[in-house]
Image: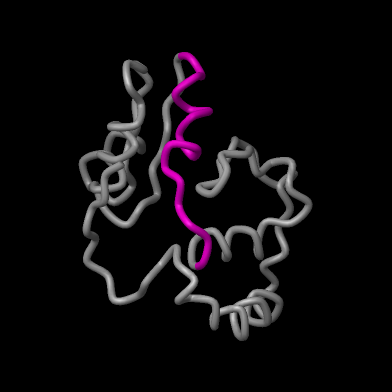
């Protein structure tokens, strides 16, 4: 297991963020964030258990909890991507650090992963 330090001021993916349950769900309701998994046009995989979130009845609360409170299991998150053939992935992590973690968990897979935090990768994706 490898731990990588990310520069951040919040303890994401930990129980220390439990208090966000008091405000974020009502904020999501207020702004109308009421998307369902069936709204997703491409697979989005859970960073907690690797499930394809297209089958989730609601996305807002599960995404919020996975991004802020639940433990991140990178190996489970990238497994569907690793076992697929000839696909391109987009990493929305906070930096190219997450792209490197994803690539490290891909083993011998030849699938390509791009990081939207990298201007070079964004240029490739938009070309």
Task: Tell me if residue 33 comes above or below residue 20 in the rendering.
Answer: above
Q: In the orientation shown, which residue stands out farthest toward the front?
A: 1
Task: Tell me if residue 45 comes above or below residue 81 in the rendering.
Answer: below
Residue at 22% x, 58% y: name it: 5
Please tell me which residue lies in front, 123 or 67. Answer: 67
- Locate residue 117, reporting x and y percent: 29, 51
- Locate residue 96, reporting x and y percent: 24, 47
Please tell me which residue lies in front, 113 or 97. Answer: 97
- Image color mode: one colour
| In this picture, residue 10 sits left or right of residue 80 | left
Residue at 63% x, 38% y: name it: 52
Q: Looking at the rendering, in which quadrant would you find the N terminus?
A: top left
Q: Is residue 81 magenta?
A: yes
| In this picture, residue 81 sits left or right of residue 53 | left
How many numbered badges does the structure rendering display? 0
- Quadrant of res 89: top left
Q: Looking at the rendering, in which quadrant would you find the C terminus?
A: top left
Residue at 58% x, 64% y: name it: 65
| In this picture, residue 7 sits left or right of residue 16 | left
- Locate residue 110, reporting x and y percent: 34, 16
Start-end of magenta stretch: 69-85
Task: Tell me if residue 32 comes above or below residue 46 in the rendering.
Answer: below
Q: In the orientation shown, which residue stands out farthest toward the right?
A: 57
- Quadrant of res 22: bottom right
Residue at 41% x, 67% y: name it: 12
Q: Is residue 30 magenta?
A: no
- Locate residue 60, reporting x and y percent: 65, 63
């Amino acid at each position: 297991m490898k731990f990588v330090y990310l520069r951040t001021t919040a303890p994401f993916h930990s129980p220390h963020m439990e208090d966000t349950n008091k405000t974020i769900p009502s904020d999501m309701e207020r702004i109308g964030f009421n998307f369902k998994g069936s709204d997703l046009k491409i697979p989005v995989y859970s960073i907690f258990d690797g499930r394809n979130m297209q089958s989730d009845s609601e996305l807002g609360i599960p995404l919020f909890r996975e991004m802020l409170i639940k433990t991140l299991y990178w190996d489970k998150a990238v497994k569907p991507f690793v076992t697929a053939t000839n696909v391109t992935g987009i990493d929305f992590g906070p930096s190219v650090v997450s792209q490197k973690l994803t690539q490290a968990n891909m083993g011998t897979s030849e699938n390509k992963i791009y990081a939207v935090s990298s201007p070079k990768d964004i240029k490739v994706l938009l070309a």
